Image: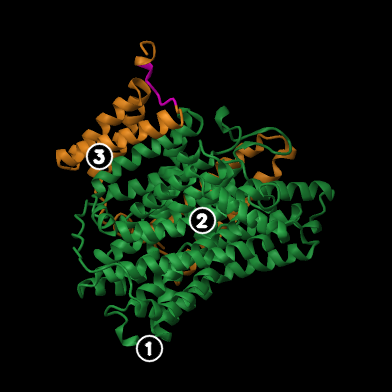
Amino acid sequence: MKKSELAVVIFMLVFCGFFYTQTLALPKAAQSYPLFVITLLAVLSVLQLIKMVISCHGHLSVVNDAGTVWKDFLPKQFFTFFIGSILFFVAMYLVGFYPTALVYMALMMKYFHIPTKHAVLTIVILLVLIYGVFTEALNVPLPVGELLYDYL
Amino acid sequence: MENQYALMAAGFINALSPVNIIIMIASVTMGIIIGCMPGLSAAMGVALLLPLTFGMEPSSGLIMLGGIYCGAIFGGSISAILIHTPGTPASAATALDGYALTLKGKAGKALGTACTASFFGGLLSCLSLYFFAPMLAELAMKFGSPEYFWLSLFGLTIIAGINSDSMILGLMSGAFGLVLSTIGMDPMEGVERFMFGQDSLYNGVNITCALIGLFSLSQAFILAEKAIVKRAKAVEFDDSVLLSGSEMKRITPTIIRSWIIGNIIGILPGAGASIACFMGYNEAKRFSKHPEEFGHGSIEGVAGSEAANNAVTGGSLIPTLTLGIPGESVTAVLMGGLIIHGLQPGPELFTKYASMTYTFFGGFVFVQFFMLAIGLVGSRLFAKIARISDAILIPSIFVLCVVGSFAINNNFTDVVIMFIFGIIGYIMRKVNMNTAAVVLALILGPLGERGLRRSLSLSGNDISVLFSTPICKVLIALSLLSLLSPFFIKLYKKGSKNA
């Protein structure tokens, strides 16, 4: 059986277990429906496990399929983007959306080696578009940032 | 009936308001741009641009989403024809003959055929939308609580069963979504469920956040994990995109056949445009007087595929709007858009909100005309846009995801929820689970829960109430049938491969 499929089954069963314990804290009348869907997910997860065991044809072993699941995966590039995204949230909270978006886009484009002309054009178009649509047309008060809030 | 004609006429007039015309032009253009970029899907585009509809009238918002949907399905053919890379899976069959025509120096002809066939496929599919949707809505009027419970299960079995490699994994995705749909206030008892102290979860997981995360942000993660590939240069072409009379005559029977195929596939929830394009292509080859040209540059091949995939659009809206069971991920996102505007799919759309619905239908018809015009005029420009690097798309998609999710309630929690769903969507895609089933479960879960609990409450917890009416029995039978449908599709794919 594939390691990734086994991981999914284990995750789902743990997920069911977590929600099951949370359900027990609810009043009796409110427990029935969540228990129904949690049981459904647990039964399907067990069925998937049985299917995986049957497909082993008697040779029960776990095959590491990480090479297939993570084929062509570039950890450095992916985590740069992922951590950059989390930093974006922090910066957006502190200094506001527009300065954060400007710096984030510029740094990401620099990281991806986008020619400066294309990068500037993209940033300008995107930010003008967001300003026009969200700030002006939809009146969305995009975060100005906790640090700048008192000054604006 | 007369009233319906009056509503149809009023719908056409309302759809032609200056605001709606601007919306149609903008949405079709955005849809084509999204569709022609390999790696971006129609569902991703509709989810990403959903927040733009917040300030609009519901009918205008829906016209916009419909325009993006149709534009994206057609847009996929541009990159399929010019750079041999289908922009969306719905254009995979178009690449077979479209690119062969390009190699022969007939790229303009291929694009013209794709555009014309998409136009007629989409336009004719509107006929069935006008004809079948009110009929099915009338049937839905007979639905009570037990029927709604089975209907929600039916919807889940369809999308979970069809869209994943493993049916159990698909059903697990749906059940996972059902558990997530229980987050929030209990609809009958009024107690907090799994809210973990977050007041913003009072009304449950926000559908828009989930949509943007599962479809758009997860796509950015998928793009970010792989090496940035430089796209092939689009072929320059100078032949006309307009078809001659004899060419039109040649592709007309193919368009009609593909329209019927695409429409039926669209109405039957689950299959979608990616299957329709191959079925349309295969049937075009089977009935063609020149089957030997297929694979070497046949305009009938391009027309067969494109008319079929665009005919799916109108057809797939029928079960979505009348019963609330979207057959594929794009219509699941569209249904999310409907709910965001405070509308519930079902008979009310054809009674209480009939004016809005027929305005949307009217707009959907005009969208096809704009698609034809914009497609023919702008194909050269779109071909250049199709080459935009993933390196530009990745941060741009992320920033739009953040703005879109923030704009829902102007709060930061929604952005965090969107990000969590982005991670969930990414991991689910890595392990071949079905993100559309999660969205559908989030939408249908509360409907099914209310149906089940009301039925049991009114019958004094007598479970036989769930099997009491003929409609319940039909829905149970359809659910069982949809669980078996992956086997039929596998058989069909095997058969067409052997052929």
Q: Which chain is orange?
A: A
Residue at point 45%, 59% (across, down): B368
Residue at point 68%, 37% (across, down): B186
Crowd band around label 1 with a 10 angstrom C-alpha radius: few (<14), some (14–19), many (20+) = few
For badge 3, the amino acid type reads Thr
Comparing B305 with B255, the one in front is: B255
Q: Colour of chain B?
A: green
- Look at the magenta stretch and give its main secondary structure: loop
In this rendering, would A9 be left or right of A149? right
Label 3 residue SS: helix
Instruction: Specify the color scheme.
Output: by chain
Q: CA distance from mark 2 to mark 1?
A: 34 Å
Q: Which residue is mark 2?
A: B364
Q: Which residue is mark 1?
A: B289
Label 1 residue SS: loop
Asked if disc 3 and disc 2 are in contact, CB closer than 8 Å, the reply is: no
Q: CA distance from mark 3 to mark 2?
A: 31 Å
Label 2 residue SS: helix
Q: Residue A81: horizontal and vertical position, in percent? A: 28, 40
